[in-house]
Amino acid sequence: MNEFELSTQDRTRLRRAVFSVGRAGVAPEIVELAMELHAELDAPGAVGPYFAHNLGVLLAECGEAARGRSMSEDLAHAARPVLRQALEADRDDLVLALGLSRACARLRRIDSAEVEAIVGACGRPHAGDRLLAAAASAVALAEGTTAQPAISTLLDALDRLLARRPDREAAAAARLALLMRKAQGPVPVQSEEAARRFLALADEADGTFGPDPARTALRLALCIERLRERGGGASHAEEAVSLAEQLARAGALEASDLLRLEAGLARRHQLQGAVGTRVLVLLRTAFGELPETDEARAALAETLEALSDHEGLLQFHGRLLGLGRADERTLEFLVRHWLRAIEAGAPSGLPRDAEPILVERFPASIARLLDPATALVLLDRVAVSLGPARAGHFAESRLLRERRLQRDPSLVVRAVQLFADAGEPERALEVGHQHVGTADSAALRVTLGKIHVGAGLRLAEAEAMLRPVASQAGPLATEARILREQAAQHPGFENERRDALIRVEERLGIGKGRPVRCRVIFPADRYVLAEMPGAKAPAFHSHRFLRVMLTPGSLPEGLSIADLKKGFEFVAEIIAEDDAKSDRVRVYWIADGKPITPLGMPKEAPEDASEAEPSEPEPPREAREPAPRREPAPRREPAPEPTAPSAEVEAAYGIGTGTARLRIEKVLGGKPLLLARALHPSDDSADLFPIRVAVHRRWLPEELRTSKRLRGLVVTAPVEREPGEGVRYRVSGEATVLSAPEAEGPETEAAAEVEEAHEPS
C-alpha cells in the first residue's frame, strides 16, 4: 500500500482548505466527506491511497457544486501535489485524474508531467465523459508546443464520445476549448483547419444547446487571434467587436479579453470610425472614465487618440494630472496642447495648478524638438505665469540642456535676464558664462557686463570679457566700451585684479618657499621668458599663464642662457610683488640666491617651413653642378636629464611613504596610460610635484576605466619611483576618487592643449 508523506506546512494548509468546504454551502454528503478528511489529517503519520481517493472525489464535486471560487482555489492548491503523487502510483484510479484535472483547471496552470498523467488516464477503457471534459479543460491551458500531441489524443477521444452521446454539453464545450487551443498552434495549415472546424462545431452547439457566453468568449478569442495575423482586417474587427458587445450585455466579458481586443485592433489600425467608438464605449463601461490599472489607461488613451477625440483626451489626461497619476504619455499630450495654445495666443483650458506641474516635469522628448523661437515664447509665458525666478530655473534645467537650444544666443540672453530680474545676479552670471563658449554673441557679453557692473561682481572678469566686443564697431561695441570704463573706474576693480592674481599665486606656491614648475617660452640673448603652467591665469590677464624672467644670475653653474631652449622645464622658487609702473598688477622673478633646478628638455621639433627662407627653383638635371661634399654637422649635446627630487620632497608629496593626492592632467587618447601631477597636501588647490606621474587605467574604479572625461579628476593612490635609469614615477595600487573631473567645454578643451615636455614611459 502506497502512503504519502506530508510536511507540517502542507498538512496545515490542506486541513484549512478541507475545513473551509463545510462552510461553502455544498451538499451535505460532501460536507460529511470533508469532515472525515479533516479528521484523518488531524491524526499523525502519512496518508494512504484511500485518503487520496476521497480527496479526489471531494475536489471533483467541489469543482462543480461550490459557490465560493476562492475556496476552490485554496483547495486545489493544497490538494494538487497529493493527487499528482497518488495518480503516479495508481493510474487506474480515474477519480484521482478527475480531481487533478479540476485542480489544474481552477488554478489555470498545468505542467507536462500532469498532462501526461491525465491524458494517460483518459485512455483507460472505463474513462467517462466527466473525466474527458475535465481533462480537456485542463490540457487546453498547457503552454508551448509539447501539449499538441495530448490535445490531438483528447480530441479523438471526445469525437468518439460525442458521436455516441451528442447531448453531452460539457464534452462539447471541452472539445471547442481544445480546438481553440489547436488553432493557436505554430503550424499555419493545422491552425487554419482547427479554426474552421471550431466555427462549424460552435454553430452546431448553439443549435443543439442554445447560445452560451463561454462559446461566445471562445469565438472572441479566435477573432482576436486572427487580428494578429497578416490578413486580419475590417471583417474580423467588426465580428470581434460584436462578440465583445454580446459578452458585455451578458456580463461575461473578461477585462483581459477586452484589452487584448483593443491591442489587436490598434495593431491593425482598425480603431477609427464606428469600430473605435464602440470599443471606447466597452472600455468606459468596463473600466470607467478613469481606469485604475496602467494597461486599461493606456488602452483608453490609445482609443481616444485613434478617434482623434482631442476634447476627450484633454479631459482624460487632465484628470490623471490632477490625481497625480500622470505618466510620460500624459505629460507629452498636455505639454503639446499647452504649446499649441501659447503659439495661438488662446487659453489652454487647463486647470490653474496644471502649468507648474508641466513646467516641473517638462518632457525631455519635447524639449529636444523645440525650435528657439518657440522656446522663447514658452519662456515668456512661464515668466508671466510663474515669475522670472521660476522661468529662469526652467530655462536652465530643461531648455538649455539641449544642444540645439544651447547654441541660440537670444535664448541664453533671455535666461540670464530672467535671473537678473529675479534678483539672482550670481546665478545669472554663472549661467551666462557657462554658455559663452556655445552661444557666444556680443549681446550676451554686453548683458553679462551690465550685470557685472550693476552688481559690482567680478569686475576684472567683466572687463576682459567685454574687450573683444569693445574693439568692434556698432552700438553694442559702444555700450561695451562704456561698461569697460565703468568697470575700470570702480573702486574695487584693482583690488579684485590683485586678489585674483594672488589666488593663482597661492595655487602655484609663489612666495611660499616651494619650487614652482616653469617652462621656457621665449629664449633671447641675455634673458629668457618662462611661463608657470601649473595654474591658469585669470581671464583679464594678457597671457594664459603667469610669466617670469630669467637672467644669468638665476642659473646654476654649468648652465648658460644659450642652453635654455624653448620648452626647457625647470623648477625654481618664485617671489612676487605689486607692480606700480605698469598695468601688470603683479611682477614675478627668481628669488635671490636660489638658482633654478633643471627638469628636462623636450625633443626638438623640425623648424617651421613658414619661417624658412624661400628656396630658388632647382635647375634642370643636366645643368646641375656636382654638389660639394657636406661637412658632418657638429654633434648636438644631449639635453640634461631631469634632476631627481630629494627624498624629503617626495615624502612631502606622499610619494613612496603612503598615498599621494593626484590630479589627472592628460588623457592619452585610447591608450591605457594617464598622466597626473601630485598635489601638495598642505594646499587643496594645487602645489604641483615637478615630475608627472603615470597612472594606468586598471588602478581606477571600474566605472571610470573606459571613460574619456578624466581630465581634472583628483584621486589618492600609492606612488613609487620606477627602477632603472631616468626619473619616472607611477601609481602602484588602487586609486580612490576625491573629486569629479572637469566639465567639458571649449575652455576646458583649450586648457588641455598644453605642450608636453616630459612624459613618463
Image (cartoon, helix red, strand yellow):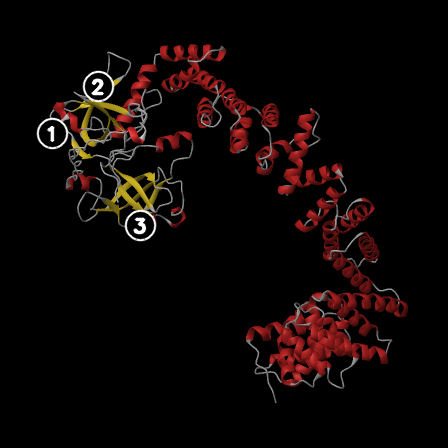
Q: Nearer the viewer, residue 251 or 157?
A: 157
Say which element carries label 1. loop
Compared with 72, 630 (above or below) is: above
Residue 699 shows up from this direction: yes
Amino acid type assigned to the residue bearing label 2 in the image: Glu
Image spot of residue 67 (x, y percent): 76, 67
x 23%, y 31%: residue = 626
x 42%, y 13%: residue = 470
Foreground disc of the pair 1, 3: 1
Mark toward the start of the polypeptide (3 vs 2): 2
Image spot of residue 308 (x, y percent): 75, 39
Query: Mark 1 to mark 3: distance in Å?
Result: 40 Å
Residue underneath mark 2: 577
Horizontal side, residue 212 vs residue 704: left or right: right
Image spot of residue 382 (x, y percent): 60, 26
Image spot of residue 547 (x, y percent): 25, 23
Residue underneath mark 1: 556
Residue underneath mark 3: 734
Q: Nearer the viewer, residue 460 or 626?
A: 626
